[in-house]
Image: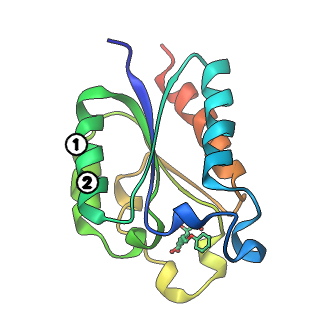
Amino acid sequence: MIKELYILNGPNLNLLGIREPEKYGKTSLEDVKSLCNEKCIRNELDLHFFQSNFEGELIEEIHKAIKNACGIIINAGALTHTSIGILDALNMFEGPKIEIHITNVYARESFRHKSFISPVATGIIAGLGVNSYVLAIDAIKELIKD
Ligand code: CA2
């Protein structure tokens, strides 16, 4: 079976492009999915794109990734700053995993400066708008090449 690239999105990211465009931009999550899909096709990767507002659903998706994925890109949203469950699940995934953020979390409130998942991330991309997603696909492609 061809392995897939899992791109996982946490709470409230379904509202991308609809609310707070001055902070998160005008691109919808559906548009982000299309951009990622184009990039994956060019890089011969199969995309699995997922969003949930529920921590447990995201953890279950990471469990599926352990079997099926060549890499994980995760924007865990606010769960980045709170979730040991997501940290533990990501820790079990042995392939490359990139933590991404649309905004520069270090230029924002101090509670966003702590990430529970950074210690197990292969790399982190933040502050580049939705381009953070596209750049992370390049990073995964580079990390999985022979
Ligand atoms: O910058 C990011 O990508 C964040 O992961 C976004 C999270 C935030 O809690 C993190 O600190 C940084 C929030 C996602 C909320 O998404 C919205 C999108 C549009 C409108 C309102 C919320």
Q: Amino acid at mark 1?
A: His
On screen, residue 18 versus residue 86, left or right, reads right
Quadrant field for ligand 1: bottom right
The tag on residue 39 is none
Q: Which image quarter: residue 28?
A: bottom right
| Foreground residue among 101 and 12 | 12
Q: Which image quarter: residue 117?
A: bottom left
Q: Residue at x 53, y 63 (%)?
A: 13
Q: Amino acid at mark 2?
A: Ile
Picture layout, residue 11 above or below residue 66: below
Provide residue 137's location: percent of width, then percent of height: 59, 35
Check whether the beta carbons of the residues at disc 1 and disc 2 lie within 8 A of each other. Answer: yes
Provide residue 109's location: percent of width, then percent of height: 57, 88
Q: Residue at x 40, y 75 (%)?
A: 81
For disc 1, does the CB lie below 8 Å from ligand 1? no
Provide residue 129's location: percent of width, then percent of height: 72, 59
Badge 1: how crowded within 10 Å, few (<14), some, or many (20+)? Answer: some
Secondary structure under tag 1 reads helix
| Foreground residue among 105 and 11 | 11
- Total number of numbered discs in the rendering: 2
Badge 2: how crowded within 10 Å, few (<14), some, or many (20+)? Answer: some
| Residue at the spot of label 1 | 63
Alpha carbon separation for disc pair 1 and 2: 6 Å
| Residue at the spot of label 2 | 59
On screen, residue 29 versus residue 143, left or right, reads right
Provide residue 2's location: percent of width, then percent of height: 38, 14
